Image (tube, helix red, strand yellow):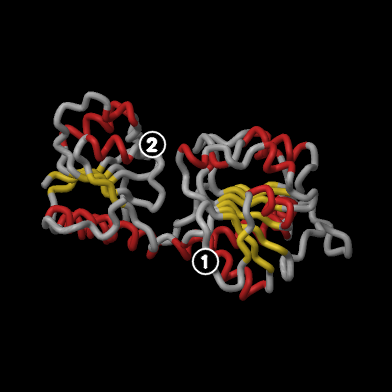
Amino acid sequence: MRVLISSKLPLEVLQASQERFDVSIRDRKFPMDAAEARSALLDYDAIVPTLGDDFSQRVFDDLPHPRCKILANFGVGYNHINVDAAKLAGIVVTNTPGAVTDATADIALTLMLMTCRRAGEGERLLRANNWSGWHPTQLLGMHMTGKTLGIIGMGRIGQAIAKRCRSGFGMRVVFYNRSAKSLEGYEQLKTIKAVMEACDIVVIALPGGAETYHVINSEALSALRSHAILVNIARGDIIDEGALIKALSLGQIAGAGLDVYENEPKVPEALKDMQNVTLLPHLGTAAHEVRVDMGLMAVSNLIAFFDRKAPPNQV
């Protein structure tokens, strides 16, 4: 079976895939566009896509009998793949849940701490040789311990964040989730607005896609308290970036910590210029063992499919 891996993966993953398949590795740093994705669907039995590869509706429109039978996505998020269109074309879609949970939760805590304690500002001050020494009112931030955390999206990652914050920082945790969930120690609120109004820190942990596009808009942001911090480790377009910039510029909220952006890899200059915003280059799962686990899970999905078994992580 011919398999295309759309971006270079860790060596352990490449070796595992090459033991079973005829593997081609796409050696480019930018995502596959629609034309390249369409061509790959006609040339390969399977594709391992990564974030940003364009497998939207237009790629599948009038697609004449694709050779590809499975998209084994490298990542838990698959909003770059139109799953319904793929299924109509006879293509199975899988992802890699579980492997990314703890690493992504850790990045959420990193952004929370860095933004609340103004760590990015402090490092920039020091590196620019502008630090004159310790004094009692320098870079005073928010103490996280005992504060109220709101989580928008209480799936695996949301629950991992909640556990860390409740156990490690003694935080009260409230959450919004599209379906009802009974989770001991955490309080579910009925609306996003209710969570925004109740919290000192809010973390976005929703899946991407049409249903969550810009759900964090100007109305939602206006419900946050003026001292509140907003963190996003999910998908960039869940937040209306223009509305966020406006809220930060007007001082409606105290700061933001972002690992994802609406038009990655482009990040608005307005966000780069703000001292109260922590910016990371999509580091959510950027740990070697995590990326290996993700890749091996994708390979396991491929092997199961071609052995005529149900892939363990079919979407």
Residue 199 appears in which quarter of the rendering? bottom right
- State the separation of the CA atoms marked 2 and 1: 31 Å
118 lies above or below 52: below
The disc, 2 or 1, on the residue closer to the chain's N-terminal end is 2
**Residue at the image point whose x is 32% and y is 35% from the top:** 55
Give residue 139's mark.
Answer: none
Residue 63 spot, x, y in % from top left: 21, 27
Q: In the image, what residue occupies the spot 29% across and 41% down?
A: 27
In the rendered image, which residue does mark 2 sit on?
30
Could you tell whether 95 is left or right of 233 in the image? left
Q: Is residue 305 above or below residue 147?
A: above
Residue 294 falls in image quadrant: bottom left
Q: Circle 2 sits in a helix, a strand or a loop, which is it?
A: loop
Judged by depth in the image, the label closer to the viewer, 2 or 1, is 1
| Residue 46 image position (x, y, % from top left) | 19, 44
Is 160 on the left-hand or right-hand side of 63?
right
Q: Few, some or many C-alpha atoms within 10 Å of disc 2 (few <14, some 14-19, many ≥20)?
A: few
| x and y percentages locating residue 277 in the rendered image | 68, 47
Depth check: 283 or 200 in front? 200
Q: Amino acid at mark 1?
A: Ala
Q: Which mark is residue 160?
A: 1
Q: Nearer the viewer, residue 240 or 87?
A: 87
Q: Badge 1: how crowded within 10 Å, few (<14), some, or many (20+)?
A: some
* Residue positioned 31% across, 38% down in the render: 84
Name the amino acid, label 2. Phe
Residue 92 drawn at (x, y percent) = 23, 46
